[in-house]
Amino acid sequence: MFKVCDKDIKVEGRMLRIARLDGDRYTFPDDPEAVIRALRNLGTRVDLFTFLQRLPDTSPKYAYPMEWDNLAALKVTTFDHWWAHQIPSTVRNRAKQAEKRGVTFRAVPFGEELLKGISAIYNECPIRLGKRFPHYGMTMDRAREYAGTFLDRSTYTGAFLGDEMIGFSKLVVNETGTHACIVHILSMVRHRDKAVTNALIAQAIRFCADRRIDYLVYEKFSYGKKQGDGLSYFKEVNGFRRVDLPRYFIPLTAIGKAAFRLGLHHSLVDSLPEPVTAKLRQLRKVWYEFRFQKVAAL
């Protein structure tokens, strides 16, 4: 991590070194040219610098090379408007399930209570969404590092059943206070009947509406060539829509220029046809379900 123009910059990759702002869906360069000049003089090789254009500007503002990226964004006016006009009755019913079943919600300060709750939630199940859950086995120290970014702009909401935290969300507000991003949101599998995640979404929208934050962002709407899945459907029925935004790629070296021209800044998976990756995802899901059932039987 490097500090450039008062922003944290991550540089990733070995053969191709790509720099981006830390948290670049809610952190943006104030002066891209100043950042580019600083990266050229950083003292370590940087081949490409990439950044996303800030909402709500969807038309390209800069002349840099670009590709289209996307966010799952919800325009927030009032909580009542979202509740009455932006979601169907089935989602409203699910959002009410948690409180009906005794779940309460409150802001949780960053500290031991939050970190213990996060660790318990992440360590509940090794398989989620048909694949190995990469955060299974999370320690308190890892939870502190994982959830402790952007503390000055973060809000944590916990869902509690009695004294047990069974779900949580983390929102990070961008520097201008115009949009908030759901960075983490997860609930326990064994309490899925309570629709805790739906209720946490409702809490996030209320948070934005109360503070007159214009947009709530739930990461990306689609990833690469991947077609719609359960997560994108969940986002859509909760009122989120795909918003395409320019992502700029500025080559800083000859390697970066050639790599961008050849498309080497994308992962290998992105180059595969969607029917192939869909089949691979299905095989992965079957394998992990078989493996998990086998381990559980021991």
Image: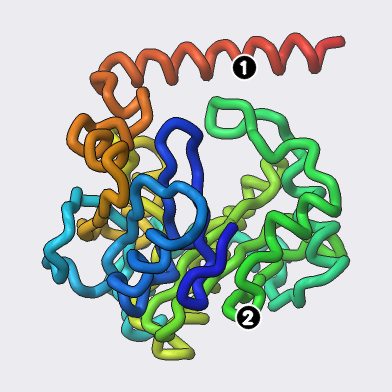
Q: Position of residue 179 (x, y in %)?
A: 39, 76
Image height of 279 relative to 159, above or below: above
Which structural element holds mark 1? helix
Q: Position of residue 83 (x, y in %)?
A: 38, 74
Residue tagged by mark 1? 289
Q: Position of residue 75 (x, y in %)?
A: 29, 74
Q: Closer to the camera, 100 or 174?
A: 174
Which structural element holds mark 2? helix
Q: Amino acid at mark 1?
A: Glu
The residue at the point 87 percent across, 10 percent down is 298
In this rendering, does residue 235 appear at all? yes
The residue at the point 37 percent across, 82 percent down is 178
Q: How is the image coloured?
A: rainbow
Res. 81 image quadrant: bottom left
Q: Position of residue 173 (x, y in %)?
A: 49, 77
The residue at the point 33 percent across, 55 percent down is 50
